Image (cartoon, rainbow, N blue to C red):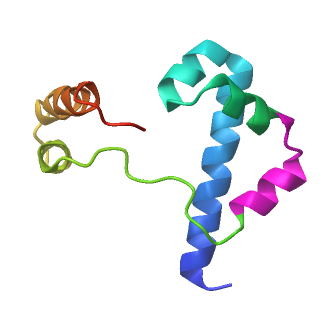
Amino acid sequence: MSNSYSAVSELNWMILQFVRESLLRDRLEALSAFHIDASLADLLLELTPEELRRIAYSKVLLVGLRWRRFSVWHCLKEYAQGTAMALPQALIAAEAEMSCGYQA
């Protein structure tokens, strides 16, 4: 397996595990945080660890970048470069994107 496929698979695996753990810890909060519905949550919780691993290692990125607007990423870049106020600005811009109909 190439390094890029390995990295994608590891990312999938970590995210799927995190989502499952979050659902087990606080289902309602996880449903809201990950923008998934109850039927998907049920399916993820029904999968065995081996089934989850097979999905994660399918060489397909299972998650995408959440925000599409340049303004969100521009603010995140400024935050990464040391501008502390850019993070709240990014979150406000991201919230505006979601309120305009962005579907996760």
What residue is rendered at 80% in x and 62% in y?
Answer: 54
Residue 51 is one of the magenta-drawn residues:
yes
Q: Give the left or right position of residue 87, taking residue 50 as reference.
A: left
Residue 26 visible: no
Residue 57, quarter of picture:
bottom right
Q: Locate residue 92, reporting x and y percent.
A: 18, 26
Residue lying furthest front in this view?
Answer: 101
Q: Give the left or right position of residue 73, taking residue 30 as reference.
A: left
Task: Work out whether 19 lies above or below 81.
Answer: above
Q: Give the left or right position of residue 68, taking residue 24 as reference.
A: left
Q: Main secondary structure of the magenta part?
A: helix
Task: Work out whether 42 lies above or below 51.
Answer: above
The one of 13 and 41 positioned closer to us in this rendering = 41
The one of 97 and 29 positioned closer to us in this rendering = 97
What residue is rendered at 71% in x and 28% in y?
Answer: 39
Q: Locate residue 67, reporting x and y percent.
A: 29, 44
Residue 22 is one of the magenta-drawn residues:
no
Q: Locate residue 76, reporting x and y percent.
A: 20, 45
- Looking at the rendering, the stretch of residues picked out in magenta corresponds to 46-56
Q: Locate residue 70, reporting x and y percent.
A: 14, 50
Residue lying furthest bottom in this view?
Answer: 2
Quadrant containing the C terminus is: top left
Task: Work out whether 60 lies above or below 22.
Answer: below
Quadrant containing the N terminus is: bottom right
What residue is rendered at 22% in x and 33% in y?
Answer: 97
Residue 26, quarter of picture:
top right
Residue 13, quarter of picture:
bottom right
What residue is rendered at 57% in x and 67% in y?
Answer: 8
